Amino acid sequence: MGLNETPRGDRIHIALFGRRNAGKSSIVNALTGQELAIVSDVKGTTTDPVFKAMELLPLGPVVMIDTPGLDDEGELGEKRVKKAKEVLRKTDIALVIADAETGITEFEQGILDLIRERKLPYLIVYNKTDLAGRVRAEDNDHACFVSAVTKEGIFGLKEAIGKLLPEEEQPRQIVGDLISPGDFVVLVVPIDSAAPKGRLILPQQQTIRDILEHNACSVAVKESELEQTLKDLGKKPALVITDSQAFEQVAAIVPEDIPLTSFSILFARYKGDLMEEVKGARAAGHLKDGSRVLIAEGCTHHRQCDDIGTVKIPRWLTEYTGKQLVFETSSGSTFPEDLSGYDLIVHCGGCMLNPKEMKHRIASSVKAEVPIVNYGVLIAAMKGILNRSLQPLGL
């Protein structure tokens, strides 16, 4: 990903739901003007949710999610329908696609009930008007009539989608509200065997971009070069941001009068619930022998021999608590529905998840009364520097 590209986690997620052969994939293609989704007269062509990152005016960068048919049959069909409904966790705008000839059936009504329960912005899109004309709309305030084949009504559908998502009262910022134009911000970026070859990881890229957008200067260094860099700058940096794994070493180098925090803590505030995760960090100190800890990550990646999620965090948490703990892992779009058996959830920074999905995971944990914390917040707590790392955020 380049600095000019919008990460998937920061794009508006638009999900399409409906029965098999209602024309969901055709609607995706008509909206984008591209053959992004496979279209077939055979029912059930889309077997798993398909994610397509693209630009959709007037919204801008979006992710279109084409889901399996809600009327899929059999045991495998039930699993596909379950996958489709799981997409609601990350949906910002829902489009329910109905056949204009048959209108709303029990399948569309079921997903509409879930959408309304979650208070998601939505439209009911009656497709195939070239074949059937217009049926009576189930909900006139949310109805659009289109033909994916002739493109009739597609422009109006785009306009209707563009009006659904309200602007945020205060746009989310990673670090821009903590710095001023002309400030120096030092980023500590370890380059080790776990670092991706030839590029920076996504939180580092996004933080650099946010600093540049606020007319400040970012200086990226490895932890081994940090001390000399601070001497060479000629002025105090407004902030030092470190990779969580180097937190202890960096804290020993950075003077107390220079604000210090981590990428993970900034991202907990950016797309999660920082205060809830601070509670989770403090709860970690009360774990007991046999406590079950879920290590959850929002993406799948190749595990290194000293992987942070499966090796370092379990090792550090065991040393920190002095207890014999039971660790389980989940990754990617998989997140357990039943969290009641866990005593703590340790989540990654969620850079590949959109805010809707990250907040759903946190809310699910809170509802199950299971403390949740992300990597960076927990590491800061285990190293005894959590209070210091929260100070730059006014906490």
Image (cartoon, helix red, strand yellow):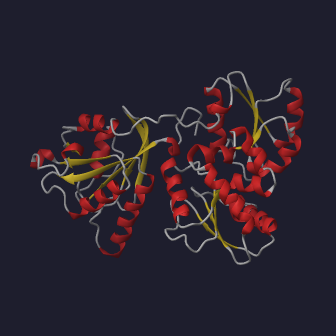
Instruction: Point out the image quarter for the C terminus.
Output: top right
Q: Viewed as shown, does residue 101 lie left or right of 4?
A: left
Q: Hey, which residue is sitting farthest front in the picture?
A: 395
Residue at the spot x=62%, y=38% of the render?
Answer: 174
Q: Which residue is drawn at 20% across and 49% down?
A: 139
- Total marks placed: 0
Nearest the camera: 322 or 209?
322
Which residue sits at x=81%, y=67%? Answer: 319
Which quadrant of the figure has residue 58?
top left
Residue sitting nearer the eye, 298 or 260: 260
Residue furthest bottom in the image = 290
Question: Seen in the image, is 197 located left or right of residue 161?
Answer: right
Q: Can residue 23 be seen in this view?
A: no
Quadrant (top left/top right/bottom left/bottom right) for the N terminus: top right
Q: Which one is in front, 391 or 212? A: 391
Left or right of 13 in this view: 27: left
- Residue 308 drawn above or below residue 132: below
Q: Which residue is drawn at 31% across and 40% down?
A: 31
- Tell me: residue 340, above or below residue 386: below
Q: Can you tell which quarter of the image residue 144 is in?
A: top left
Visible in this render: residue 165?
Answer: yes
Residue 87 location in percent, x, y?
A: 41, 57
Vertical order, 361 against 231 (above or below): below
**Image check: 287 left or right of 43?**
right
Horizontal and vertical percent for residue 40? 26, 55
Q: Taking 290 as reference, is 355 above or below it? A: above
